[in-house]
Amino acid sequence: MLAISSELPIVDCQLIRFGVISEEQARTRILEKVSPLDERAVPLAGALDCFAAQDYFARLPLPAFDNSAMDGYAVVANFCKKGGRLRVIGEQPAGPDRKLRVSDGEAVRIFTGATLPQGADAIVMQEDVTRDGTDISLNVDVEAGDFIRRRGCDLAEGQMILAKGERIRAATVALLASQGFADVIVGGKATAAVISTGNELVKPGDELQAGQIYDSNSELLSALLQRCGVSATAVEHCRDDRQSLGDAIKRGMKNHVLIISGGVSVGEHDLVKEALRELGAKIEIWRVAVKPGKPFLFGTVPNKSSDSAGETPAGLTGSPRRIRPEADTMPMPHKCFVFGLPGNPVSVFVTFLQFVRPAILRMMGATNLDLPQVPAKLTVGLTNDGDRPHYIRGRLEHEKFTPIGRQESHALFGLSQANALLRVGVGQSLKADEIVDVQICD
Ligand code: AMP
Ligand code: MG
């Protein structure tokens, strides 16, 4: 059995106004605060990874008309036998319907996607005939229906093609295009900024001095945001001093979401809480019973300077349906949702996926806020004898889950090898070969 040791809780009780809350409570509180942003119309080219703001139904059946699945010859099957000869009376390429008609003893040269000529009920592949001037002889028997794509066999007119809240994927964009939609109404565009705090941090590419480390959280958070369909408007590094932090927060809070990494714990250099309070932030959550990630912080900070003419009412529930045309510059939101993530990279990863991702997806109009979850056979026994649920990083392969790397919050290499998370509850003991549900986090 691989026992998961608990981290020592480092808590100065004098400083703490907030109790540690459960993950469920944290998630509920966060999701109560955020609500979907205004819908907008976007051209299909910009719709990938957005969420549909309404149900969509097929305007056309697919295929829209009976057509050929092959390059070959359209024939009347009943009159076709191996060795038979047919006269080629015309040609129907893909494109406008030439309204040809085929009868007994005849064939129409046809190409993939071309309208089926009247009277034809089968296609003979060109590889299965021998052409001889205006005639062909058949090298195969033919059955009615061969290589014909019937109107509506894939999709019926009126059938739902996209549900409200569903993510628009590459194939969804293609399906909408096939229906003639040039635009799609999607959920609001969440804007996000990232601040990485820490005097020890150096930008990748610059030279390291002793005791310094490269800032990896900025890249991690940008990438995690991208996976949610959001590209960060700003990613900045900030030293651990109140002035710099306050200034960086002021810049970042013009977004719907501000994610700050590091500086949220209880050390003297953890200044995020104070800096936020000085800017009028309401801290809703500080410290969640989760491993890694306990010092997680969530709050809201008002944007006093926002231009009331075109504000996006982030966080307002029950507002009437408004659809914005897609604009290059988004108006500043009334308030910004701030997430303070503990600086260790695995803590950033886990708390982003468990708390930030659902909030962003909700703002963007998604229905399903959960990571995809699948059953898997655990390859080793695991016991959580700590005081917080533990997200074990592991590899999901061939429906088996194996913990990978050091299960510590600084262990970035192990994290980089993982593609799934297993939540082990407090006191939970899981046996090898047990079937567990794992979250896919790749
Ligand atoms: P903190 O939450 O600021 O106390 O940081 C906890 C740990 O995470 C420390 O070891 C930091 O050096 C490390 N850390 C903080 N920010 C980053 C970052 N942007 N990239 C990599 N490691 C970081
Ligand atoms: Mg720090």
Image (tube, grey):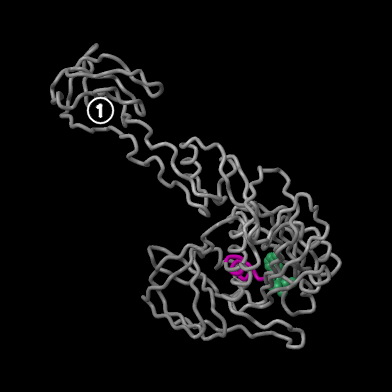
Q: Is residue 274 left or right of residue 431?
A: right
Residue pointed to by mark 1? 123
Whether residue 30 is visible: yes
The residue positioned 33% from the left and 29% from the top of the image is 67
- Residue farthest toward the top in the current orientation of the protein: 133
Whether residue 291 is visible: no
The residue positioned 35% from the left and 31% from the top of the image is 65
Is the magenta region chiefly helix, strand or loop? Answer: helix
Up the image or down, 53 lies above or below 348; here it is above
Q: Quadrant of residue 71?
A: top left
The image position of residue 102, as x and y in percent, is 24, 19
Q: Quadrant of residue 182?
A: top right
Q: What residue type is labelled 1?
A: Ile
Up the image or down, 362 lies above or below 148; here it is below
Up the image or down, 238 lies above or below 268; here it is above
351 part of magenta stretch: yes
- Residue farthest toward the bottom in the current orientation of the protein: 13
Magenta highlight range: 344-353
The residue positioned 31% from the left and 34% from the top of the image is 149
